[in-house]
Amino acid sequence: MSPVLPSVTSFVMELDLERVVAAADDLPKEAREFVGLWDSREAAVERREFTLGLGLADSIELGASAENETATQLFSRWADPEGSLRAFAALPFDARCRTAADWPEESGRLVIPLVRLTATDGGLRVLQVKDSPAAARIVAWLESLRKPGPNADLESNAQVVDSGVEPFCERVQTALTRIEAGELEKVVVSRTLELRGSFKLAAALRRLAGLPRTVRFAWSRSERWFIGATPETLLEKSGRELRTEAVAGSLPRRSNDEAEARALLASPKDLREHAFVVEAIRAALAGQGVSVEAQPLTVRTLAHVHHLVTPMLGRCDEDCSAVSLARTLHPTPAMNGVPRAAALDFLRAREPGRGFYAAPIGVVDGRGDGIFAVAIRSALVSGERAQLFAGVGVVAGSSLPAEVAETEAKFASMLAALGVRREERAV
């Protein structure tokens, strides 16, 4: 006799999703087992949605191989005739590099939340994965939010306690030496900024809402929150249609967008850095039998930074999944370097494990479709400690002062989200 599978039910609730986000610091314990947020309404993507997962119904580790079988195994445990089930997905930057204990995961994982909320024109659609006391308590908590409540406290006493400048500069100088010696063509060096304070997650997530051309995301387990608003989409897969993009080459945004965009488009250093990513994406997908067509190069202007962007379109095999494509593409030279193996070796030897920083994070379904972003412009918040992350592509001709300035620009949105005032940023 076949086992009885848990069934999925859904209903509409008259509640604004942002009202739920505003109550993130007061989640019931059942919801805190897992929290996943995906908000692509402001991003340069086809699939624009706002969805929030609360509680843990099921999960499975994403190993280094057999991704299709793993995802299929997870979804096969559930009766979902309408295909409404979704899983939040996250992969580590480097599966071979163990990360610090602060990270909520050591490995990649697919998670089906106990309750998933999705914004619709008619209100909030609530998808309850199974009938359980925990799910009932989460739904009851949501019902309580329909009553007017106080706004999230936006005050923060956070301060920068470690700028991370010295080790960052040492890594950049070493990278330039290796590039001059012909061992590397490019390597992406990251910098961390450490904060201490009393952090309001609801306020941080609200401040990240609406940043232009970004995906707002969150992934939380064990009271550790990885949050951010990234401008980079790794891929979108729908049926056989595939969308990806090369994002590399950056300039801080200062006062004249048009002049700065022209300067970026004319920068040999940035164009060279960008070309590495375009060609690496082509080669990686060609190895999977997927050809892509590059669209015209453009500049994406964000709140604090300009980026060179090349959108790319392609078609893939029907049995190819979003998870396997993410594995194929990651890490692109935009997050790692060229040659790929030599750049990874450089980072393994000189950087602490990146965890989910600069790695794929997204939402997938049982058909293999889904969307992944690259988890940059992000922070890991655990108790009264927060680590912010920023990276720069080092190539021949890179300038150390310019790379430091670029990280400062990339930190700006997360510093503002966590409530750090400009005068408090210096150590």
Image (cartoon, rainbow, N blue to C red):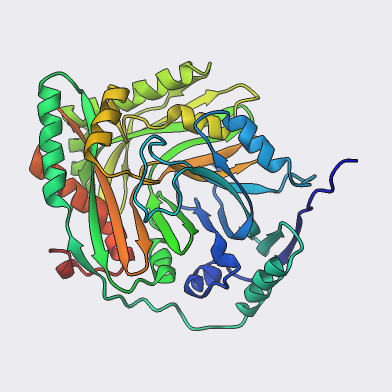
The one nearer the camera, 164 or 99, is 99
Residue 420 falls in image quadrant = bottom left
Q: Looking at the picture, does residue 421 appear above or below residue 4?
A: below
Q: Looking at the picture, does residue 242 appear above or below residue 407?
A: above
Residue found 28% across the figure and 51% down from its top = 389
The one nearer the camera, 305 or 193, is 193
Q: Position of residue 50 (x, y in %)?
A: 55, 56
Residue found 23% across the figure and 35% down from its top = 349
Q: Quadrant of the N terminus?
A: top right
Q: Quadrant of the C terminus?
A: bottom left
Number of residue marks: 0
Q: Position of residue 140 (x, y in %)?
A: 68, 75
Q: In the rendered view, does 294 fall on the left or right side of 38?
A: left
The one nearer the camera, 194 or 202, is 194
Is residue 398 at least partly visible in the picture?
no
Is residue 306 at least partly visible in the picture?
yes
Q: In the rendered view, does 310 fall on the left or right side of 150?
A: left
Residue 402 falls in image quadrant = top left
Q: Position of residue 262 (x, y in %)?
A: 21, 37
Residue found 47% across the figure and 21% down from its top = 285
Residue found 18% across the figure and 67% down from its top = 422
Q: Looking at the picture, does residue 178 appear above or below residue 369?
A: above
Q: Looking at the picture, does residue 417 appear above or below residue 245?
A: below
Q: Position of residue 121 (x, y in %)?
A: 64, 60
